[in-house]
Amino acid sequence: MSRTAMVTLSDIDTIEFLVGRKFPPRTLAVLPSAGKTDQKVSSRLSMTERALIPMQVADHRAVLRAIPSDELEALFNRRFFHHPNADADFDHWSKAAHWTLDEAVALSFGKERKVVNSTALQTLQDVSP
């Protein structure tokens, strides 16, 4: 199946999410343009490795842009708990009088209980996330 020449906004959001998953902010924090560097990551990377990060990010972005939209969407949805809608709304949950056990566990991982819960995670019981 071929991809249309035009990249949609949702494709760009998906691409940026996937780039962020491969190169988390902590990794990018070692770059001089990022301001304050993360010393733990910075000390593990050589000067050459740090210099290569921007090129690796650009290369990864280019590879993702070449992937058909349906395959890109499959990569994006591979692990539902990494999806942006799985992030907890701490403003909401901090106002609750109490939490259930499922809510407390999900929130301790920074996740929304309606998305990340014991029922949803049972599908991953036999595989490593």
Image (cartoon, rainbow, N blue to C red):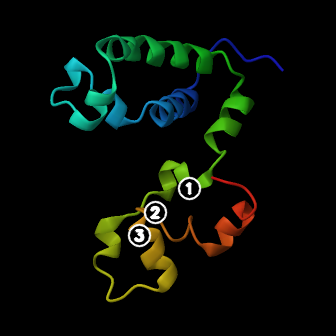
Q: Which residue is mark 1?
A: 81
Where does residue 113 sit, x and y in percent of width and height? 51, 71
Mark 2: few, some, or many residues within 10 Å (few <14, many ≥20)?
many
Instruction: Say which quadrant the N terminus sits in.
Output: top right
Q: Write down the quadrant of residue 53 in the picture.
A: top left
Q: Choose between 65 and 26: the one closer to the eye.
A: 26
Q: Earlier in the sequence, mark 1 or mark 2?
A: 1
In the rendered image, the residue lying farthest to the bottom is 97
Where does residue 111 sit, x and y in percent of width and height? 46, 63
Q: Is residue 46 above or below residue 25?
A: above
Using the rendered image of the protein, determine whether residue 29 is visible from the camera's viewpoint: no
Q: Choose between 91 and 47: the one closer to the eye.
A: 47
Contact, CB < 8 Å: mark 1 with mark 3? no
Type of amino acid at the residue the image marks with label 1: Phe
Q: Earlier in the sequence, mark 1 or mark 3?
A: 1
Q: Write down the quadrant of residue 49 in the picture.
A: top left
Q: Mark 3 falls on what kind of element?
A: helix
Type of amino acid at the residue the image marks with label 3: Leu
Q: Residue at x 44, y 30 (%)?
A: 23
Where does residue 69 sit, x and y in percent of width and height? 69, 27
Q: Which residue is mark 2?
A: 111
Disc 1 to disc 2, C-alpha distance: 7 Å
Contact, CB < 8 Å: mark 3 with mark 2? yes
Where does residue 44 sit, x and y in percent of width and height? 32, 29
Contact, CB < 8 Å: mark 1 with mark 2? yes
Q: Which residue is mark 3?
A: 107
